[in-house]
Amino acid sequence: MTPALRHTLVEGHNPQSGRFDAIRLARALGLSVPEMAGVLGYTPRGIRANPDSKNLQTKLGGLVGLVIRLMEELDGSMENVRIWLHAPHPDLGGVPPYRTMQQGNFEAVETLIAAMEEGTPL
């Protein structure tokens, strides 16, 4: 990847519009459309109808930001990001991070990532 695109996830963008694309990002993260809809607080039908909607851009941007931070902590590997998102996490009561986000607790996942960045256990 070119250094100028380090701030984003190319595989999560619609190449025609240049905007974030919920379906492409879901695929990159190993999530189904209904799972991604839950993370974003939208309906699967709405995401399928317009995956790069302007209304989704802020939430998708926040999610991409978390993924980029995770990649930095996990040796730049999307495979490791997918594993981390799907693995039950002890600091989340054994719930995988993506499910915690689906339940509306994005902050708990952000806190985990911040602790990883700071090297401090929770």
Image (tube, helix red, strand yellow):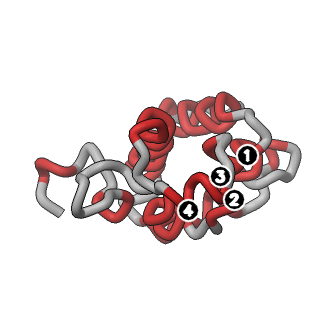
Q: Residues within 10 Å of mark 1 (few under 14, many from 20)?
A: some
- State which tag comes first along the sequence, 2 or 4: 2
- Residue highlighted by disc 4: 48
The type of residue carrying mark 4 is Arg
Where residue 101 appears, as percent x and y from the top left, is 69, 42
Say above or below: 46 vs 91: below
Residue at mark 3 to residue at mark 2: CA–CA distance: 5 Å
Q: Are marks 1 and 2 in contact (CB under 8 Å)?
A: yes
Residue nearest the viewer, comparing 41 with 10: 41
**Pointer 3 and pointer 2: residues touching (CB < 8 Å)?**
yes
Q: Which residue is drawn at the image coordinates 50% and 30% (left, top)?
A: 118
Q: Which residue is mark 1?
A: 102
Q: Point out the frontmost of discs 2 and 4.
A: 4
Could you tell whether 85 is left or right of 17 in the image? right
Tag on residue 35? 2
Task: Tell me if label 1 and label 3 are in contact, CB under 8 Å.
Answer: no
**Labels 4 and 3 touching (C-beta < 8 A):** no
Cα–Cα gap, marks 4 and 3: 9 Å
Classify mark 4: helix, strand or loop: helix
Image height of 69 relative to 87, above or below: above
Q: Which residue is mark 3?
A: 37
Q: Going 44% across and 33% down the picture, which residue do you hit?
A: 58
Q: Between residue 43 and residue 22, name the one nearer to us.
A: 43
- Quarter that holds the C terminus: top right
**Secondary element at tag 1:** helix
Q: Is residue 23 above or below residue 60?
A: below
Task: Identify the amino acid type marked 2.
Answer: Glu
Separation (CA) of disc 1 from disc 2: 7 Å
Tell me if residue 81 can be seen.
Answer: no
Q: Earlier in the sequence, mark 4 or mark 1?
A: 4
